[in-house]
Image: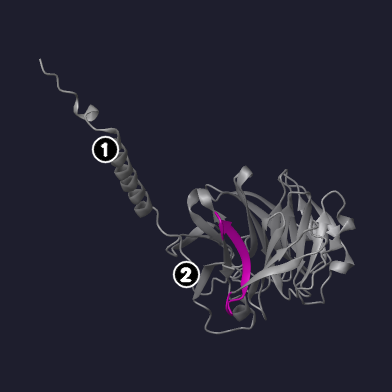
Amino acid sequence: MKRTLPLFRQFTAPTSVALLAVLAACSNKKTDEAAPAIPATITISRPALYPEGLAYDEANGRFLVSSFTAGVVGQVKDDGTYSAFADDAQLVSTTGLFLDVPRNRLLVAIADPGAGSRTATATQGKLAALASYNRSTGQRLAYVDLSSLRPNLPHFANDVAADNQGNAYVTDSFAPIIYKIDAQGTASVFLEDSRLAAPAGSFGLNGIVFHPDGYLLVGKYDDGTLYKVPLANPTAFTRVATAQVLASADGLLLSDNNTLLVSANRPTNTVFRMRTTDGWTTATAAGTFATGDVFPTTMARRGADVYVLQSHIGALLSGQNPPVTQFAIQKVTF
């Protein structure tokens, strides 16, 4: 009796390989078609929002932005859709954001520059606070008043970072202070030094990042200086020596242990890529990205990409009327 092999066994080896290649190509094609392109620019149409802080929440596919004027923390999708993520009466003006992924929380720095709908005589130029929100639900977890630690000074909580143990660090632009808030919510003055002060009415300490080797890198807005602050001995802080002028240094982002991105707004409107070979004793410029006259503030990493926030806060501070109606989250390319 003549036996017929099952169909799948009748293919020769070359034919099978060819078929597998075709199937793989089809599969890859479907995958490529399913994955939408990451936008170079995300436009936020929200009149007078003036966002300052930026974070990217990979798990939920959204950017999070603060607001100088409304105080609300918003979420932004790739198509520019904006909606509220967290809002309560104590969010006077929200500034720096830090997404603490291991603890599933968003840290929010709070100030009162006098430009928001919730500004008050009691808090204008005197407010420094930190709030935390559940990353998944937007529910508030804690609120810490930092200005009460030094009640007789002007205050402006600007940026926030966190270390591996969950300690948060907040810069104060109106006082030469970095605050520490431990994982239990207890606040203290981590560093206070007159060398970190800015002239009255000017912004001083601003961007801050945690370095995994056990120190903070901090920028000072008024003179563009960078500082290295050891966690174990903050009073032993040192200035990072660099020939690059970083005037109006705002947001900081550690790209890797030896690469720091610094966003500077007016007059340069530039993101600087700074590199070190000696553990941030010194640094040199290794690239720039011009944003245009958009008052870039903070940055966020999204996979291998970095985005910078076009805040237009300069227009707000100068009293421009009518207010800016569109803002953007812009991919940085060197």
**Residue drawn where x is 64% and y is 74% of the image:** 270
Mark 1 residue type? Thr
- Is residue 260 found left or right of 320 in the rendered image? right
The image shows residue 281 at horizontal and vertical percentages of 83, 61
Query: In the image, is 324 to the left or to the right of 185?
Result: left
Q: Does residue 168 sit above or below 118 in this rendering?
A: above
Identified by mark 2, the residue type is Thr
Q: Which portion, as a residue range, is magenta? A: 291-305
Q: Which of the pair 132/150 is nearer the observer? A: 132
Q: Is residue 88 visible in this depiction of the protein?
A: no
Q: Classify mark 2: helix, strand or loop.
A: strand
Most foreground residue, 291 or 232? 291
Quadrant containing the N terminus is top left
Please report the residue visible at 58 percent of the width from the left and 75 percent of the height from the top.
291
| Residue 246 placement, left or right of 231 | left
How was the colour assigned to the protein in this rendering? one colour
Let me know if residue 303 is in the magenta part: yes
Q: Mark 2 points at which residue?
A: 43
Mark closer to the observer (2, 1): 1
Instruction: Give coordinates of residue 134: x percent, y percent.
Output: 58, 47
